[in-house]
Amino acid sequence: MARSAMTFEQAAEDVQSLPERPDNDTLLRLYALYKQGSEGDVRGDKPGFFDFVGTAKYEAWSKLKGMPRDIAQQEYIDLVARLKG
């Protein structure tokens, strides 16, 4: 598991230097997978109605509820690898 965590953290660093900015849906998927992989199931209250970005992030993360952290981390790693080309 330690090796997987290092790869996950490396992917988190690599996402900052992608050759192109991903579309919004992909950005939300990256966010949700990262949060699920690092913190587990979504916690806290859903942001207010006028916080569109916060609400979108919360909803994307909440869709992954119950996904094991190691699966979320691997999906995040795989997605970043595809985006890197």
Image (cartoon, grey):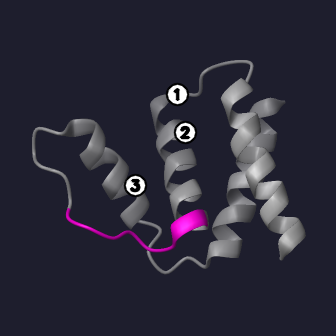
Q: Find disc 1 in the rendering and name its residue.
A: 23
Q: Nearer the viewer, residue 62 or 1?
A: 1
Q: Find disc 2 in the rendering and name its residue.
A: 26
Identity, as a three-letter code, of the amino acid under mark 2: Thr
**Disc ID at residue 60:** 3
The answer to whether the residue labelled 1 contacts the one labelled 2, judged by CB atoms less than 8 Å apart, is yes
Residue 26 position, x and y percent, is: 55, 39
Label 3 – label 1 distance at C-alpha: 14 Å
The answer to whether the residue labelled 3 contacts the one labelled 1, judged by CB atoms less than 8 Å apart, is no
For mark 3, give the secondary structure: helix
Question: Residue placed at 25% from the left, 48% from the top?
Answer: 55
Image quadrant holding the C terminus, namely: top right
For mark 1, give the secondary structure: loop
Q: Main secondary structure of the magenta part?
A: loop
Tell whether 53 sits left or right of 29.
Answer: left
For mark 2, give the secondary structure: helix
Image quadrant holding the N terminus, namely: bottom right
Question: Residue placed at 67% from the left, 18% from the top?
Answer: 20
The span shown in magenta is: 38-45
Q: Is residue 9 magenta?
A: no
Label 1 – label 2 distance at C-alpha: 5 Å
**Disc ID at residue 70:** none
Question: Residue placed at 80% from the left, 47% from the top?
Answer: 10
Residue 35 position, x and y percent, is: 51, 59
Which residue in the rendered view is the most extreme toward the left? 49
Residue 39, placed above or below residue 13? below
